[in-house]
Structures are given as C-alpha cells and as structure tokens.
C-alpha cells in the first residue's frame, strides 16, 4: 500500500509518500517488526489497559505488569503512551511486538507531520493504526496478538474520542469507556458502575485507577498499585491542551483515595 | 547520429556553476543565526504555506533557497534519512553533520552527473546541550559544505546580507532582538521594510522542554516580536 501514484503521461511518481512504515518496508524491510516469523514462544504479555472519555477529553490508564506464563516478566512495564501531541495509545498483548508497534506508530505520525507540515486528523491516525494492526495479523495467528486502544482530542470536532481494535485490525469507536487485555472484563464491570458522562479530570483519573485495582483483584495477570514499592498505573490524559502523562504523586493520591474507601 | 561537441571539463563546470548561481540569485534569501537560546532561521516568504524553513529531526532544522521543487526534494530526503536512522539506531544518533554530508554527496553527484545542477543552497542547523553545541552547515549546489559560526545568509542577496550582518551581529542576542535585526537586514538590500506576515521564521530552542526543539513562529508572534 502506498499513496504514490504515477503521472499517466511521464511515468514520473507523483507526490511524496508521507508514510514512515512504507519507507521502512522499502529501505529496511528486515527492521519491520512483522518480518519476524516466530510463534509458540512464551513471550511476555502486557495485560490490562483502559480508556475513558471525560468532560475535557480522554484518560487512558494501564497497570504495570507483564507476564510470561506464570512468571511476572516485568513489574514496571509501561503500556500507555502519548502517540503525538494530541493522541495516546495503550496496548495489551505480546509485549515486544506491542511496544515496537507503538514506537513505529509514533514515528508514523511524526514523519507524516514533518513531511506534509500538517498533523493527521484523529480519524486518519485511527485508520492508520488499524492498518498497522492488520499487517500484524499473520503474527497474531501464531499467538503474537496486539490489541490497542487509541484515543485523542479531535481538533476538528473539539472533543475527545476513543477507539478500540481487535487483532484483525477491526476498528470501532467507543462513546464511553473501553478496556482490553486479560483484565478487561473486571475493569469494564468496574467502569460500568462508576463511569458517567461529564466526569472532571480528578474523577476520571479515580475511576480509571479504581477499575485497574478491580481488575488486579480478579485477574492474576494484572498488577495492582504497589504503595510499598511505589509502582503506580500509568495515566495519560489528552485534552485540547495536548497529551500529558500524570506524575506518580498524582496517581498515588488517586490510588490512596480508592484504597481508603476499601479498608 | 549526433555528435557531442567537445567541451572541456573546466568550461562544463563553469557553465553549470553559472547556471545554478543564476537560478539561486533570482530567489529570496534566508538568514540563519545563533541567538541566546539556540538557532533562528528567518526568511522573507510571501507564502505562509510553502515553507523554506522546516523541522528535520528533534534538534535539527533545515532551510533552503532557490528552486522550490528541488529544495523540497532535499528536505523530504533529509527527513526520511533522519527518521530511518533514528529508528534503526537511537534518536540521539541523528546528527546534523551526517545530514550535511549526505546532502553534500547527493548534490555533488547531481552537479557532476545530471543534465542540470540543482539550483539550491541549503542550511542544516542543530542545537545541543549548550552554546558550544550549536552548529550550522551551509551546503552549496555543487556539494561543497562549510561550517558556519554565528550567522549566515544564503540566496539572492547573500553577500549584501552577510555584510550588514557582520556590522550588526552580536552573540547572545535574545529572540526579539535577533528577529528585529534579521528582518531589518533582510529588507536592507533594496531599502524596504518587510511586512510581518511576509516573514517566515523557525527556531530551535535549547530551553524547549519537548524532545522536538523546532518551533515555527506564527505571524502574530513575529508581529509581536517586531513591535516589542
């Protein structure tokens, strides 16, 4: 897939392809994450992530645990990232594959922005991600499934929007909240009770953190916040002002507030 | 069958060089200068969308004069090279020097082997940790590269601009002073005042907390800087 077309008369190529992924495929195919062919290996799995809409935009959060079989492969993994200035991506599934997909996706957006001088629309970003997940499908069949959540602030519509995907690259827009990964079900149950339209940022953060705590209680692969060791969920917020990752202290405050109501 | 008349290499290079010079002299100029917080690229450009100045990578910016299609071609190739390298190795491994070398190689090949040389001159600028980390590379249409310090002017009135910059330039200018003086210098060759919305400017700011240090100055920002 490339948007470079030829001029019918001269045969010269028309327009510069603004895609970094296509460039990488042409120039360094061996560096493409999906050119790895392996399956049946017990690779670390990133577990629960969630996203929700609130009054000013969206909040995305993820626990910090990665598991390989019954082993905790990583207690401090980051699964939620700012994709660019106005969007964020959260990933669950085969960790190595997922992190590489995020890195490539971030570059894809930056490359497009630099080459064309314009940011992709939120819709455009969401579609591009769907294509990248679809390209990973041969690996997904072998067990290396990557399922992201994507969200951001739509500068055209002036609102936060949330998208979720399946392993085949299917893409749906979500109006309220969504979770994916091993702890998705308990997280969604929790969100269903606590989410409401028009939450403010503190409430949104608290609802997100509480859903992750609920997920950790019901799912062995999801890591709860660890106050003793200072391991807290990663929370990224996107509003009209841009994408920001919350500092640990703020997340810790939300965690403590939830923990207090339960002790 | 047609015969190519013999042309001495001396003459051939001279002709091409003249051709490129002429093309560049027709266009407007760009000034690159170091100021207190980094690097300023500034140009007279009536278009607000067809840029002469652009971001290449985190700490690297680009400016071109001459034929738009040709420096745009170089700009795109530069971004591709930088992004590929940064992805294959690490972000901090992308250096302005490597880009300047790549541009130099490409332009030199085009100059000697293609039907016509590129009618362009470009600047590749980079900021790093401190004042000493700033570098500006000036690449000519034939691939020759120079490493510039303090300030540089390229394009149509490059010589005049360099002369007046020499008189005015003071290291450690803040941004408003740098912009004001640069705009004055740009208008000096034909003694006019350039309107703020005909100014295109971009800065690489060391103090910028983001990873990407490049920022385009908006029309209103330029107006503010000029008025202040």
Image (cartoon, coloured by chain):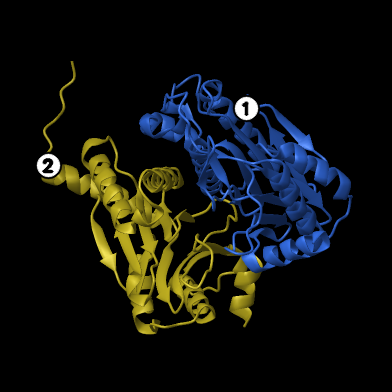
What is the drawing colour of chain A? blue
Query: Which residue is identified by label 2?
Result: B9
Q: How many marks?
A: 2
Kindly identify which chain the residue marked by label 2 belongs to.
B
Query: Within the image, what quadrant is residue A229 found in?
Result: bottom right
Q: Nearer the viewer, residue B68 or A228?
A: A228
Tell me if residue B155 comes above or below residue B13 in the rendering: below
Q: Nearer the viewer, residue B177 or A263?
A: A263
Kindly identify which chain the residue marked by label 1 belongs to.
A
Quarter the C terminus of chain A occupies: bottom right
Dots 1 and 2: beta carbons under 8 Å?
no
Q: Nearer the viewer, residue B186 or A80?
A: A80
Tell which residue pokes out farthest to the top in this image.
Answer: B1
Tell me if residue A224 comes above or below residue B30 in the rendering: above
Residue A82 - label: none
What is the drawing colour of chain B? yellow
Instruction: Please name the residue shown 45% across and 58% down the image.
Output: B58
In this image, B227 relative to A44: left or right?
A: right
Query: Which residue is identified by label 1?
Result: A167
Give the x, y percent position of residue A218.
72, 42
Give the x, y percent position of residue B78.
39, 47
């Amino acid at each position: 897939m490339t948007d470079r077309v030829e001029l019918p008369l001269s045969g010269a190529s028309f327009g510069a392809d603004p895609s970094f992924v296509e460039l990488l495929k042409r120039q360094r195919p061996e560096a493409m994450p999906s050119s790895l062919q392996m399956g049946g290996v017990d690779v670390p799995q990133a577990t629960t992530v969630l996203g929700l809409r609130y009054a000013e935009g969206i909040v995305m959060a993820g626990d910090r645990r990665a598991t390989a079989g019954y082993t905790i492969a990583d207690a401090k993994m980051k699964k939620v990232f700012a994709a660019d200035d106005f969007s964020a991506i959260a990933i669950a599934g085969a960790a190595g594959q997922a992190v590489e997909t995020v890195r490539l996706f971030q570059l894809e957006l930056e490359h497009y922005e630099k080459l064309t001088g314009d940011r992709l629309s939120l819709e455009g970003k969401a579609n591009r991600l769907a294509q990248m997940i679809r390209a990973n499908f041969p690996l997904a069949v072998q067990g290396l499934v990557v399922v992201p959540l994507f969200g951001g602030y739509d500068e055209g519509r002036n609102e936060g929007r949330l998208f979720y995907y399946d392993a085949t690259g299917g893409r749906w827009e979500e109006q309220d909240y969504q979770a994916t990964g091993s702890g998705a079900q308990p997280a969604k149950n929790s969100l269903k009770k606590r989410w409401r339209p028009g939450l403010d940022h503190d409430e949104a953060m608290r609802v997100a953190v509480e859903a992750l705590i609920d997920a950790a209680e019901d799912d062995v692969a999801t890591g709860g916040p660890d106050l003793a060791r200072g391991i807290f969920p990663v929370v990224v917020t996107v509003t009209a002002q841009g994408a920001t990752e919350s500092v640990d202290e703020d997340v810790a405050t939300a965690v403590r507030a939830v923990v207090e109501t339960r002790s | 069958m047609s015969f190519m008349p013999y042309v001495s290499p001396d003459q051939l290079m001279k002709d091409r060089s003249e051709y490129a010079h002429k093309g560049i002299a027709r266009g407007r100029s760009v000034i690159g200068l170091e100021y207190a917080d980094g690097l300023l690229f500034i140009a007279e450009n009536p278009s607000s969308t067809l840029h002469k100045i652009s971001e290449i990578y985190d700490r690297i910016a680009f400016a071109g004069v001459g034929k738009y299609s040709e420096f745009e071609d170089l700009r795109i190739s530069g971004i591709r090279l930088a992004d590929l390298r940064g992805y294959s190795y690490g972000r901090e491994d992308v250096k302005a020097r490597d880009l300047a070398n790549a541009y130099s190689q490409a332009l030199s090949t085009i100059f000697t082997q293609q039907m016509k040389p590129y009618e362009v001159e470009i600047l590749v600028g980079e900021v790093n940790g401190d004042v000493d980390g700033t570098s500006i590379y000036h690449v000519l249409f034939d691939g020759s590269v120079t490493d510039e310090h303090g300030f540089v002017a390229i394009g149509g009135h490059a010589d005049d601009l360099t002369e007046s910059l020499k008189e005015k330039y003071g290291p450690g200018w803040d941004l408003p002073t740098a912009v004001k003086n640069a705009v004055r210098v740009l208008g000096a060759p034909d003694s006019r005042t350039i309107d703020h919305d005909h100014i295109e400017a971009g800065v690489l700011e060391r103090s910028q907390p983001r990873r990407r240090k490049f920022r385009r100055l908006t029309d209103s920002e330029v107006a503010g800087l000029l008025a202040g």
